[in-house]
């Protein structure tokens, strides 16, 4: 492998990580408050989760394609990729936030209310800490999926490790494909293990 | 057992949204410093009555007065911070240490850290769990009886004048249960809190309470000391007495 290719792999790995980190960051920043909102308005839960779920079923290449002509968020390049990846990350984060908070023992919630906690105190001091590991599991799934989907982002000019995969497919060069696929797979495994470890540390004792 | 009623149910009723009445026309005065046991079968309305006191539920008929003021006129948060609450499932926060569980209401009330620590130590001592050993532990490291003691300590943390207990010892084995009943009685002899103690066990009611209120079908059936109830002829009262004697 030439030093040039190695340098290129390092650059694209960096772009790949940035793409995923930013989009998952945004998905979490939107998804957790949205999930909290849904636990306060259970009637909205089904339609919103349904809608977010539908986005998940759109094939990723198609979603990238759909977004290109959309003004403001679309076009060729990184911005479109970020939007698409954020959409994909939303479902696991929102769903796990709802599940995590709903899974808090009703006796614990009642004790908190009975002790005179406000809704906000109950959320911040009890519900979120107890749901944290479940919410993080959602972030983990979103991240691992995002690392995979981000390889497609190369197709719309957003760069990332997909660059090598598309190049390798065009050139019928398996080594070139592996130059993208292998780092992507390692990233996914690494993210899974790292976030998984934090998740276990946050799991409440029982 | 003197002075003004501290808690007063005045024709209090509670009806769920569908229209079914869970509690009807309950009138009952609990004097300051008195312990009243509310006893009844499942679905008799006793837990509902208890939740009306700390405004977890709001009466749909009549009213409940605490300290002379209707619960609906209280800020519910203030009312609950001044009312200790112990439930059967204990509801200790599993992610907080025993010390932080006990010190939670003082913490919410913004006490200085040093004062909270001193209070936690004092309370854990009071329920027989020395702080040096227990304050740093977590709920899952305690036995059921110890957890329930922590639940009592937590309810007393901000020194509330009123304590509500909803089958607090219901999930414990008979020996631990008897121990805790005795400890509760001793504690009450010293603290003289106004207390409402919900149970379905007549013997427990007789051990912990000054007076017993027997509930059935959402209504108050009988009220009196255990000796007075023993002389009662109402079939529901007899049924409870006989179940307790068995």
Image: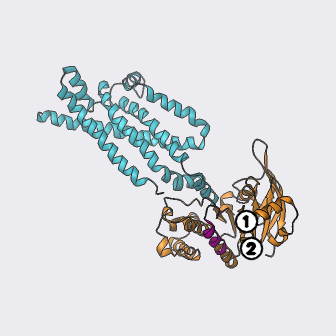
Q: Colour of chain A?
A: cyan
Helix, strand or loop status at disc 1: strand
Query: What's drawn in magenta, residue-wise?
Result: B167-182
Which chain letter goes with mark 2? B
Establish whether labels 2 and 1 are both on one chain. Answer: yes
Which residue is most to the right?
B233
> For residue B98: magenta?
no
Picture coordinates of residue A7, whole percent (x, y): 17, 37
Residue B103 visible in the picture: no
Q: Colour of chain B?
A: orange
Please tell me which residue is depicted at 59% across the width and 54% down the height of the picture. A109
- The quarter of the rendered structure image containing the N terminus of chain B is bottom right
Tag on residue B196?
A: 1
Which residue is most to the front?
B246
Q: Is residue A75 left or right of residue B95?
A: left
Which chain letter goes with mark 1? B
Q: Within 10 angstroms of label 1, few (less than 14), some, or many (20 or more) residues? A: many
> For residue B177: magenta?
yes
Q: Nearer the viewer, mark 2 or mark 1?
A: 1
């Amino acid at each position: 492998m030439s030093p040039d290719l190695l340098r290129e792999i390092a650059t694209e790995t960096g772009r790949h990580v940035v793409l995923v980190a930013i989009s998952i960051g945004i998905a979490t920043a939107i998804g957790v408050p949205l999930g909290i909102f849904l636990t306060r308005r259970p009637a909205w839960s089904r339609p919103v989760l349904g809608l977010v779920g539908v986005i998940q079923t759109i094939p990723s290449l198609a979603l990238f394609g759909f977004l290109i002509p959309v003004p403001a968020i679309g076009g060729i390049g990184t911005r479109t990729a970020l939007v698409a990846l954020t959409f994909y990350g939303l479902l696991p984060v929102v769903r796990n936030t709802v599940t995590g908070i709903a899974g808090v023992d009703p006796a614990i919630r009642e004790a908190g209310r009975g002790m005179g906690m406000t809704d906000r105190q109950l959320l911040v001091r009890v519900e979120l800490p107890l749901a944290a590991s479940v919410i993080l599991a959602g972030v983990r799934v979103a991240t691992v999926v995002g690392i995979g989907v981000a390889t497609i982002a190369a197709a719309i000019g957003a760069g990332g490790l997909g660059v090598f995969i598309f190049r390798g497919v065009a050139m019928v060069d398996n080594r070139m494909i592996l130059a993208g696929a292998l780092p992507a797979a390692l990233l996914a495994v690494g993210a899974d293990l790292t976030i998984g470890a934090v998740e276990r540390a946050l799991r409440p004792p029982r | 057992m003197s002075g003004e009623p501290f808690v007063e149910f005045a024709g209090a009723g509670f009806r769920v949204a569908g229209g079914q009445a869970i509690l009807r026309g309950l009138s009952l005065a609990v004097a300051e410093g008195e312990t009243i046991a509310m006893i009844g079968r499942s679905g008799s309305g006793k837990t509902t009555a208890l939740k009306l006191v700390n405004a977890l539920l709001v009466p749909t008929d009549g009213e409940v007065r605490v300290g002379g003021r209707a619960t609906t006129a209280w800020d519910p948060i203030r009312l609950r911070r001044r009312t200790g609450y112990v439930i059967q499932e204990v509801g200790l926060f599993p992610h907080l240490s025993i010390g932080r569980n006990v010190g939670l209401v003082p913490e919410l009330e913004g006490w200085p850290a040093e004062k909270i620590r001193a209070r936690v130590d004092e309370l854990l001592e009071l329920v027989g769990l020395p702080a040096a050993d227990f304050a740093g532990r977590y709920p899952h490291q305690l036995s059921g009886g110890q957890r329930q003691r922590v639940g009592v300590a937590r309810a007393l943390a901000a020194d509330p004048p009123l304590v509500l207990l909803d089958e607090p010892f219901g999930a414990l084995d008979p020996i631990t249960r008897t121990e805790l009943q005795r400890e509760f009685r001793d504690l009450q002899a010293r603290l003289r809190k106004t207390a409402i103690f919900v149970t379905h066990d007549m013997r427990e009611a007789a051990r912990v309470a000054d007076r017993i209120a027997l509930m059935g079908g959402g209504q108050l059936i009988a009220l009196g000391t255990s000796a007075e109830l023993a002389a009662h002829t109402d079939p529901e009262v007899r049924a409870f007495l006989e179940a307790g004697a068995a």
